[in-house]
């Protein structure tokens, strides 16, 4: 997928990050100020209110994650406000503050949905521990809420497009890992949008204002790649007329995205592993170590386990990179997202050309039927080509690339055959079994596996359709000649 998308711009200007928000509701100023100071130190975005009416306005204007609520407010019962909050915003956690706690009031508050309570005068260390606990409790539900809020008004999350279950699961994982510094390994076929996911991880996290630097490990020679990543000093080799700072050093505090990590030469893999373990790099030709703190996000369309067995990828580097693993679905595995993707890419084309584009129903049917071996990148290129070739604002079947138009001929041919003579399900099943056995030389075990049924079921079907003797003889003959 193209990396020039809303929310994660190519130039690195990110969206504002999401902070946990907290509302302090208390009529005593020193309580509000103390709670605000502690919460802001912990990273909360803090709002304050000195009455129930003021708190209601804040709750209507902002999405609040945690409320510190005095049980006694001027002219209002805090328990009533608690009930209102839990009714209207059930995911918001409420901690009651009370100077006159009774068993009944505490039980009532807890039964009404309060997370916990603090008794006045409270120790600020106790407040901090309680806020840490509620933060941990909120973390998973917050990730889900972020995803839901994005999907209400956007076709996807952080520049990624799609609302299928596979993509929603991916969004939740991205939201979860974005706040950490763990290495991430992104797997997926070519064209599925691995760099887009890497950008989403970086730009939705707390280090979004630091550099994001992509490196294509498959496009550089080993010597150039080493110089690009680690840098070199003047005179390190012929042609090194001046020193060069490596990308691992330039990206300090940010993210290095190593695309197609499986193409990295084995000796350079060893140097990368050593750098990740020691948190320092050694520029070529230098004896001085340079400390660095960079998050490594790697991506591959290769099976690295196979590469390890073949000796082309280091097992220890694989484990170092594979702390968090993300699997991107191929486009044919989430065809329900094709409508959204088509709308998104046509809108993008319209913005760049100034001509509003749409697609015909017949053309959309072909796009939905096609298997998309090149995934999202192929879909985007297909629509760009169709828009360039079409003289109309409406893209038709004739505007689509030949491979997509031709793929429909097989579907039409099959459909025509079905229309010529409608077969019963039993006939279709018998035909499928006979065809499979013929192609597999009567191997019943393999035939059963290929058809997705058990061997006992296959024998029963053979007997039912009167073809048991034929294949039994073939199988017997194979055993005798073997």
Image: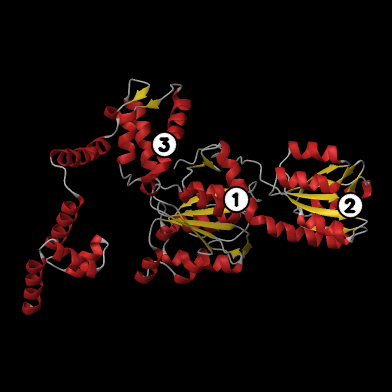
Q: Secondary structure at mark 2?
A: helix
The residue located at (89%, 52%) in the rendering is: 34
Q: Is residue 353 left or right of residue 82?
A: left
Residue 471 at what x, y percent from top left? 10, 68
Residue that carries the numbered disc 2 in the rendered image: 34
Residue that carries the numbered disc 1 in the rendered image: 144
Pick whichever, 41 or 312, lies toward us.
41
Residue 128 at what x, y percent from top left? 81, 59
Q: Specify whether residue 431 is in view.
A: yes
* Residue 339 marker: 3
The residue located at (6%, 71%) in the rendering is: 473
Pick whichever, 322 or 274, lies toward us.
322
Q: Is residue 294 left or right of residue 108?
A: left
Q: What is the crowding at mark 1: few (fewer than 14 residues within 10 Å), some, or many (at least 20)? A: some
Tags 1 and 2 in contact by the CB under 8 Å rule?
Answer: no
- The quarter of the picture where residue 442 lies is bottom left
Pick whichever, 414 or 261, lies toward us.
414
Q: What is the basis of the colouring in this image?
A: secondary structure
Tags 3 and 1 in contact by the CB under 8 Å rule?
Answer: no
- The quarter of the picture where residue 109 lies is bottom right
Of label 3 and label 2, which has the lower sequence position? 2
Cα distance in 3D space between marks 3 and 1: 24 Å
Q: Quadrant of the C terminus?
A: bottom left
């Amino acid at each position: 997928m193209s990396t020039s998308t809303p929310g994660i711009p190519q130039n690195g200007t990110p969206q504002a990050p999401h902070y946990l928000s907290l509302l302090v509701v208390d009529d005593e100023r020193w309580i509000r100020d103390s709670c605000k100071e502690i919460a802001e130190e912990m990273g909360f975005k803090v709002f304050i209110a000195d009455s129930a009416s003021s708190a209601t306005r804040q709750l209507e204007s902002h999405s609040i994650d945690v409320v510190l609520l005095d049980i006694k407010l001027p002219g209002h019962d805090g328990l009533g406000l608690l009930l209102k909050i839990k009714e209207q915003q059930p995911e918001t956690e409420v901690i009651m503050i009370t100077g006159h706690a009774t068993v009944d009031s505490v039980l009532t508050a807890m039964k009404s949905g309060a997370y916990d309570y603090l008794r006045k005068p409270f120790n600020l260390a106790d407040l901090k521990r309680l806020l840490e606990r509620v933060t941990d409790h909120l973390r998973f539900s917050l990730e889900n809420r972020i995803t839901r809020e994005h999907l209400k008004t956007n076709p996807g999350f952080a520049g990624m497009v799609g609302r299928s279950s596979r993509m929603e699961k991916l969004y939740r994982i991205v939201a979860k890992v974005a706040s950490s510094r763990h290495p991430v390994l992104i797997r997926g076929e070519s064209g599925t949008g691995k760099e887009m996911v890497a950008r989403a991880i970086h730009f939705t996290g707390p280090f979004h204002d630091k550099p994001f630097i992509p490196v294509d490990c498959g496009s550089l020679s080993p010597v150039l790649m080493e110089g690009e990543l680690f840098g070199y000093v003047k005179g390190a080799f012929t042609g090194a007329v001046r020193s060069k700072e490596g990308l691992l050093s330039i990206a300090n505090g940010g993210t290095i995205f190593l695309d197609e990590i499986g193409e990295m030469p084995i000796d350079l893999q060893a140097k990368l592993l050593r750098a990740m373990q020691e948190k320092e790099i050694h520029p070529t030709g230098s004896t001085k170590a340079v400390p660095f703190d960079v998050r490594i996000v790697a991506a591959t369309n290769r099976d690295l386990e196979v590469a390890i067995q073949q000796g082309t990828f280091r097992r220890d580097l694989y484990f170092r990179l594979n702390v968090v693993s993300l699997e991107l679905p191929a486009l044919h595995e989430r065809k329900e997202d094709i409508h959204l993707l088509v709308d998104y890419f046509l809108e993008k084309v319209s913005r760049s050309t100034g001509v509003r584009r749409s697609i015909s129903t017949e053309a959309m049917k072909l796009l939905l039927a096609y298997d998309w071996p090149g995934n999202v990148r192929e879909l985007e290129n297909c629509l760009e080509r169709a828009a360039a070739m079409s003289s109309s604002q409406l893209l038709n079947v004739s505007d689509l690339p030949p491979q997509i138009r031709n793929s429909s001929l097989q579907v039409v041919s099959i459909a025509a055959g079905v229309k010529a003579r409608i077969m019963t399900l039993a006939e279709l099943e018998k035909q499928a079994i006979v065809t499979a056995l013929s192609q597999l030389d009567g191997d019943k075990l393999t035939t059963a596996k290929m058809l997705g049924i058990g061997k006992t079921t296959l024998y029963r079907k053979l007997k039912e359709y009167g073809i048991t003797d034929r294949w039994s003889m073939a199988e017997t003959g194979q055993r005798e000649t073997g």
